[in-house]
Image: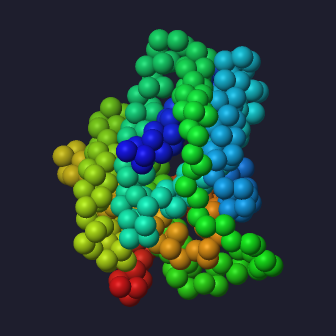
């Protein structure tokens, strides 16, 4: 099945990205880097994509996805191999933005491929398969990186991860047919990002996407912090958070059938309601089984929404500008990953954890009301 081939290409690149991000953190600590340096290295994975995503989307709209996919995979491999060749903290400052930018290019290009694959009626199902692949690689990436570090050391693990996009490059080079791409439309003069944001359907989709991204990103920051404050061991916190990952996988497996029967905006409204309710309940709970249950419920809500958002984004974008629209969403995603933890950390330090959970819950529930009006 051709869609499995596309999922494999994307998953190999995503495995390298996820594994490299974890290995970079541990490698920097092993080299004696400070906590501030580690934080800066992690931020570098997102800074350039935040600035370049829209430009990359326009490039993909113009060139089609094949060359950007090949370039993204090649730079991913080079970026991951650099710390093996030159093991130092200084080279991690080079490899981190290279890996982050390369995956951003691959991510936008593969979204273009999946958006153009099949009929418009199948688009939500197609993006559900893509998201299911992301769930698998997101779970396996840290596992592969951890075992590679134990087996080959930190530098050797980076080289092992670099081999994954090389495999994808070989698979793509052997493919004779072009990758699916949206119908090419001659680009006249337009108002850039501002013009896209004036389109109601696209603007509404981006607002919903921003709220859901916020809910997703804040969990990986708040749960470890909340768990440590209520006295949970690191291993227990990991078990609680794994319930979130399992839920995203489960719901995306079901979603391939669910999206055929449920209105897309109704699905988004339901997902936001579930996620908002879970966030509201978190500060009221300290029992590990209940925290596991809440994490699972939160994963169901947030995991169900992402494929639907991508299908709506593609449908709301003008012909020939789908990559640019995905670039705007990617910019928002990287802004969220960079600034939301900083803001949440400041609020929780000043006022405690409960106001942060309550604020996130209120925003998601307001988003559910907003999405329900689109049905």
Q: Give coordinates of residue 272: x percent, y percent.
A: 35, 70
Establish if 256 lies above or below 186: above
- Dividing the picture into quadrants, the one containing residue 101 is top right
Which image quadrant for residue 40? top right
In-front residue for pair 68/369: 68
Direction from residue 189 to residue 8 in the image, left or right: left
| In the image, residue 9 above or below residue 32 | below
Residue at image location 40% in from the left, 58% down from the top: 126
Say if residue 16 shows up in the picture: no
Q: Is residue 62 left or right of residue 77?
A: right
Quarter of the image containing the C terminus?
A: bottom left
Where does the image place residue 81, in percent across and percent down from the top left?
66, 23
Task: Kindly identify the residue that appears in the image at 41 percent across and 28 percent down.
Answer: 143
Relative to the observer, which residue lies in front, 234 or 67?
A: 67
Residue furthest front as drawn: 176
The x, y position of residue 162, in whole percent, is 60, 26
Extreme residue toward the right, this view: 189
Looking at the image, residue 175 sits to the left or right of residue 122; the answer is right
Give the residue at x 34% y 37%.
Answer: 238
Vertically, is 362 above or below 172?
A: below
Relative image position of residue 151 (x, y in whole percent): 47, 11
Which one is nearer the viewer's eye here, 153 or 188? 188
Write the residue at 25% across / 61% down: 257
**Horizontally, is 172 left or right of 124 in the view?**
right
């Amino acid at each position: 099945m051709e869609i499995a081939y596309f999922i494999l290409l994307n998953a190999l690149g995503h495995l390298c990205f996820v594994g490299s991000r974890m290995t970079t953190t541990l490698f920097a600590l092993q080299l004696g880097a400070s906590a501030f340096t580690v934080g800066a290295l992690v931020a570098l994975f997102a800074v350039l994509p935040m600035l370049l995503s829209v430009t990359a989307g326009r490039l993909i709209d113009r060139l089609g996805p094949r060359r950007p996919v090949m370039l993204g995979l090649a730079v991913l491999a080079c970026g991951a191999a650099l710390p093996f060749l030159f093991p130092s903290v200084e080279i991690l400052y080079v490899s981190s933005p290279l890996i982050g930018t390369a995956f951003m290019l691959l991510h936008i290009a593969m979204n273009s491929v999946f958006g153009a694959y099949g009929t418009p009626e199948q688009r939500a199902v197609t993006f559900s398969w893509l998201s299911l692949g992301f769930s698998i690689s997101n779970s396996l990436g840290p596992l592969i990186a951890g075992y590679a570090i134990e087996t080959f050391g930190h530098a050797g693990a980076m080289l092992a991860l670099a081999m994954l996009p090389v495999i994808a490059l070989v698979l793509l080079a052997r493919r004779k047919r072009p990758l699916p791409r949206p119908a090419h439309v001659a680009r006249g003069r337009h108002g850039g990002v501002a013009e896209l944001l004036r389109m109601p359907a696209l603007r509404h989709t981006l607002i919903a996407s921003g709220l859901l991204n916020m809910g997703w990103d804040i969990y990986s920051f708040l749960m470890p912090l909340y768990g440590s404050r209520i006295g949970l061991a690191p291993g227990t916190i990991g078990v609680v958070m794994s319930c979130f990952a399992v839920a995203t996988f489960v719901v995306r497996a079901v979603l391939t059938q669910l999206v055929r029967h449920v209105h897309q905006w109704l699905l988004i409204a339901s997902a936001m309601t579930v996620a908002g309710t879970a966030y509201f309940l978190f500060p009221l709970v300290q029992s590990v089984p209940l925290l596991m249950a809440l994490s699972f419920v939160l994963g169901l809500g947030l995991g169900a929404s992402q494929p639907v958002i991508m299908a709506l984004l593609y449908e709301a974008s003008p012909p020939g500008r789908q990559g640019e629209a995905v670039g705007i969403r990617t910019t928002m995603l990287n802004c969220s990953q960079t600034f939301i933890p900083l803001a949440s950390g400041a609020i929780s330090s000043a006022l405690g954890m409960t106001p942060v959970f309550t604020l996130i819950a209120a925003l998601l529930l307001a988003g559910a009301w907003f999405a329900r009006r689109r049905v």
